[in-house]
Image (spheres, rainbow, N blue to C red):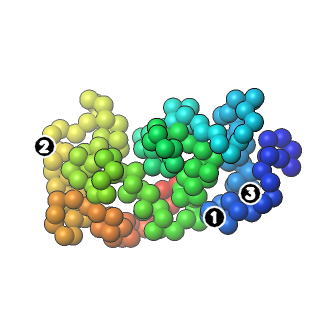
Amino acid sequence: MGGSASHLSKEQLSEYQELTFLTKQDILHAYRIFTELLSKDLVDFQNIRIAKERFCELPELKANPFRERICLVFSTAIEKDGSVSFEDFLDMLSAFSDSATLEIKSHYAFRIFDFDDDGTLDKEDLKNLVNCLTGGTSDTQLSEAEMNQLIQNILEEADIDKDGTVNLSEFQHVISRSPDFVSSFKIVL
């Protein structure tokens, strides 16, 4: 192993493989990408975090309308600033990998779509979700009537207990009937 990948010990590599859905090659590739984002003079790799703004510039995230939410959901930063450690990055790649289970993928998708982090998708979360998917600009934004109709349709389909929100269980039920979800919920480096 040459270059920056030599800083990962065999034990670390083995542990990362055991704890994720990633292969040795995936982990080494992620390590190279992560270290390229770092300043060359940093020494303590284990405690390094990359700022959300810098991390969101990765080509794989840059075009994703949920890039900031992805960083916030996978970040373990105490400050809740969305900064990302190498282990956060591996967790994200693992959840988005082809090998991740439907349960894992749907759990993280739900958290990404839960903009207010209250454990449910309410009308405001659904509005934010639709705006992210449509681009949220004045040219692509739905009218208020269209948005209300779409949210009503989503709730009619997904809100099994009719409480006006979609919880994780209801979300996973809807996702389980969507065979394309697993293949479309990924980030490839």
Query: Which x, y percent locates residue 1?
Result: 86, 49
Residue receiving disc 2: 145
Which residue is nearer to you in this view: 75 or 71? 75
Query: Which x, y percent locates residue 162?
Result: 16, 66
Please identify, in this view, whether the residue under mark 2 or under mark 3 is nearer the observer. Answer: 3
Residue 97 relative to residue 6: left or right = left
Residue kind at label 2, given as amino acid type? Ala
Residue shown at 51%/48% (left/top)? Answer: 76
Q: Residue furthest front?
A: 78
Residue receiving disc 1: 19
The answer for how far apart the CA atoms under marks 1 and 2 are is 46 Å
Instruction: Check contact, mark 1 vs mark 3: CB within 8 A.
Output: no
Secondary structure of the residue carrying tag 3 is helix
Question: Which is nearer the N-term, disc 2 or disc 3?
Answer: 3
Question: Which is nearer the N-term, disc 1 or disc 3?
Answer: 3
Residue 150 visible? The answer is no
Residue kind at label 1, given as amino acid type? Leu
- Please tell me in which quadrant of the rendered image residue 3 appears: top right
Residue shown at 15%/40% (left/top)? Answer: 144
Q: How crowded is mark 1: few (under 14 residues within 10 Å), some or many (20 or more)?
A: few
Residue receiving disc 3: 12
Secondary structure of the residue carrying tag 1 is helix
Residue shown at 22%/39% (left/top)? Answer: 142
Q: Residue 1 carries which label?
A: none
The answer for how far apart the CA atoms under marks 1 and 3 are is 10 Å
Which residue is nearer to you in this view: 186 or 10? 10
Residue 163 visible? The answer is yes
Residue kind at label 3, given as amino acid type? Gln
124, above or below 183, in the image: above
